[in-house]
Image: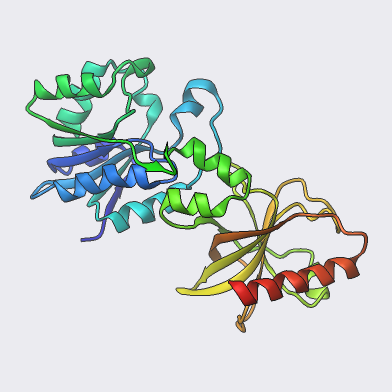
Amino acid sequence: MLMKVFTSLDEFAKTGYHTSVALGFFDGVHLGHQAVIKNAVKNSGSLCSAVLTFSEPPAKTLTGSAPPLLTTNELKQKYFEVSGAHALIFADFSSLRDLSPQDFVGLILKEKMRAEKVFCGFNYHFGSKGAGDTGLLSALCSQYGIEVQVSDPVYYAGEIISSTRIRSCLSQGKMKKVRAMLGRPYILSGKVSEGNRIGSSLGFPTLNFAIDPTCAVPRYGVYASRVLINGKFYRGATNIGVHPTVKENASPLCETFLLGYEGGDLYDAEVFCQLLRFIRPEKKFSSLEELQKQIKNDIESISRTG
């Protein structure tokens, strides 16, 4: 069954589905988030397994700013679909922010979601000013006969996995830790644009795209990578940064030389770049010749070790 995507709670309410629903913003859809969603799917029985999340970070509505995202809505949708969820609802947080915990349960979960089972993480909060916690959620849901299951924290290396912790590791280029906590490599995606062709002039043509300004940017430098193009993966040498040797960009780019790719230009194609391993920091070289030599060394190193 293909997952159906809804852009509002009112749209979903019209379906009449009774649900087993996972609650959360789920930035990164890391292993802790996956545990919540898997429980909702696994225990759905004849119910519609649904993910209720938000189209924008709640913090942006509440404070005007939010931490950089680990996943775009497009990637979230793909991850939720792989989990087996039947429905995904991108709700508007601003329309829910002032609801009391009681109204959130009664009006949203009971009336619009027709929830019979609710799943959330151990640190889930809801209602105006985050007044409701998991204990209150269980108490309020029990009044409507709604079953609540709270997932325990998931640990990596003795510490709780969190989006904040993943962002910290990402900023340091600690990709092994990032991958372990996400349960998959970190992915950057974008539409390929025409660059300055410096790579081509050096003998290493690259595909380039600007990094979404709302997304977390990894440590500047060179990475061993895999890039998905038209359903096929290619190994790559990816540079994340601002090109200090040539002409420094105002915002960071993802620039990848593909190993073994013999296709044509990819301009305007949507590509997904998995960052596997940090190779070295970005550096300003004294000449293009020195840069060319280093790129060659980077590619040879990635070719040998992956």
Q: Residue at x 87, y 59 (%)?
A: 285
In the rendered view, would you say 167 is above or below 249?
above
Coordinates of residue 82 in the picture (x, y in percent):
31, 58
Q: Quadrant of the C terminus?
A: bottom right
Q: Horizontally, is 268 left or right of 182 in the view?
A: right
Compared with 167, 59 (above or below) is above
Quarter-of-image position of residue 221: bottom right
In the image, 297: left or right of 70?
right
Residue 287 position, x and y percent, is 92, 64
In the image, 288: left or right of 8? right
Can you give x and y, in whole percent of width and height, for residue 188 in the image? 55, 55
Q: Can residue 215 be spotted in the picture?
A: no
Identity of the residue drawn at 56% across and 38% down: 68
Number of marks in the image?
Answer: 0
Q: Quadrant of residue 269?
A: bottom right
Q: Is residue 220 left or right of residue 227?
A: right
**Residue at 58% across, 50% down:** 174
Residue furthest right in the image: 286
| Quadrant, the N terminus | bottom left
Q: How is the image coloured?
A: rainbow
User: Residue 300 placed where, x, y %?
Assistant: 70, 76
